[in-house]
Amino acid sequence: MIPRYTRPEMAAIWAPENRFRIWLEIEAHACDAQAELGVIPKAAAQAVWQRGRFEVERIDQIEAEVKHDVIAFLTNLAEHVGPEARFVHQGMTSSDVLDTCLSVQLVQATDILLADIAALLAALKRRALEHKDTICVGRSHGIHAEPTTFGLKLATAYAEFDRCKDRLEAARREIATCAISGAVGTFASIDPRVEAHVAKALGLAAEPISTQVIPRDRHAMYFATLGVIASSIERLSTEIRHLQRTEVLEAEEYFSAGQKGSSAMPHKRNPVLTENLTGLARLVRMAVTPALENVALWHERDISHSSVERMIGPDATVTLDFALNRLAGVVDKLVVYPDSMRRNLDRLGGLVHSQRVLLALTQAGVSREDAYRLVQKSAMTVWQEGADFLSLLKADPEVTAALGDEELDGLFDLGHHTRNVDLLFQRVFGDS
């Protein structure tokens, strides 16, 4: 995490103060359950809540000597709780604290990410409705294909991020589990009711069966979901970058007063935000492979996953939070040029209507092979000489033998390509 790409609310989740606060809550809730079961005195559980404190600097100092973070925390906690601290961590193992804490942190992070996606969806919906009927050319392989609308482009992005929201909600449910099952997960030294109590207190589900750790397939799915969201960010960012190219210039990032695009060329207005988002997406996806490799731990546990998660947990969530927030801002302020879109649409002299002519010829009795040959012959002339496609078709006797001038004119109606826009918007946005 570096400040340039970090927002404070997400960073706070991964700060030592929050981590140790969650550890304290886990231990305190466990003591409450143990006290209710008669395993420890109720006064001891009360003491943990009343006098439980920690200092990050003191924990670091102790850990430098004992080389164990949970023991260092428990030692510092005992310095505040006093004699009753001997009842803390009864029957528990370090992973009970570490894994349950990570679950809490990932849930906290996910709630922020879900709010980020909601803000992005709102921006996409507003701009999609604004440009619902803004005609532009669709492209396949980067080449002009057929007309579409800019609103449909944005509606497509909305639907994709709506799916991202659904996936992230599922990932939140998957990761929100608690394990307080003791060494190798058998509950030999701790009652399963302690786990149930802690889970409920923290808003988690009890892990159905753990080893000494929560199974890492859950975490793999979680980080894979973040990777998919990052790829969706990159997809929309790449589209905007292409549309901002000088030769296209159908849309561009907002360029504020006083902003400068190049240290050498004062005329430059570069798509720096979406380029940045492309890079940030790569960083989020960087967490996916290590998370998948963490699934295969030795036997009931090892700690090969630990160092990985200490890095990818903060890095992936912090980076994705920043990226989603930035993308929402880009969409919200995106500058759109409908006139440029129309000029680009007309650049190929009507070739975007070639499929309609092809289909009309087949409907008129021409074989598909001959129809394709006739249409392509005129189309290639347009490509090579810059001629008008409709005029060439009207001058071809083989074409006019099947289709009259009025029929050909009708095939060049842009309204044909936008006649289902309302249907598509209803599918994506409902009746809103």
Image (tube, rainbow, N blue to C red):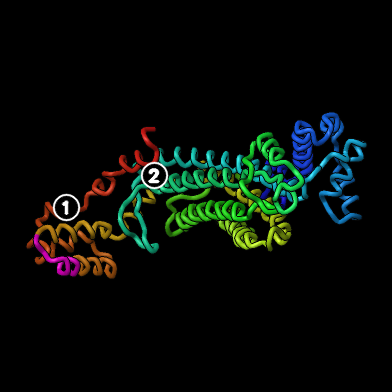
What residue does disc 2 label? 151
Q: Is residue 92 above or below residue 291?
A: above
Type of amino acid at the residue the image marks with label 1: Asp
Foreground: disc 1 or disc 2: 2
Which region of the structure is painted magenta?
Answer: 365-374
The CA distance from mark 1 to mark 2 is 26 Å
Q: Which mark is residue 409?
A: 1
Comes first in the chain, label 1 or label 2: 2
- The percent coordinates of residue 296 (x first, y second) are 63, 62
Circle 2 — which element? helix
Q: Residue at x 36, y 58 (%)?
A: 139
Q: Residue at x 59, y 55 (%)?
A: 217
Q: Nearer the viewer, residue 395 or 285?
A: 285
Q: Residue at x 16, y 62 (%)?
A: 393
- The percent coordinates of residue 275 (x first, y second) are 56, 56
The question of residue 366 being in magenta is answered with: yes
> Residue placed farthest to the left in the image?
401
Q: Is residue 266 visible?
A: no
Image quadrant for the C terminus? top left
Q: Residue at x 58, y 51 (%)?
A: 222
Q: Would you say the magenta stretch is mainly helix, strand or loop? A: helix
Q: Is residue 285 visible?
A: yes
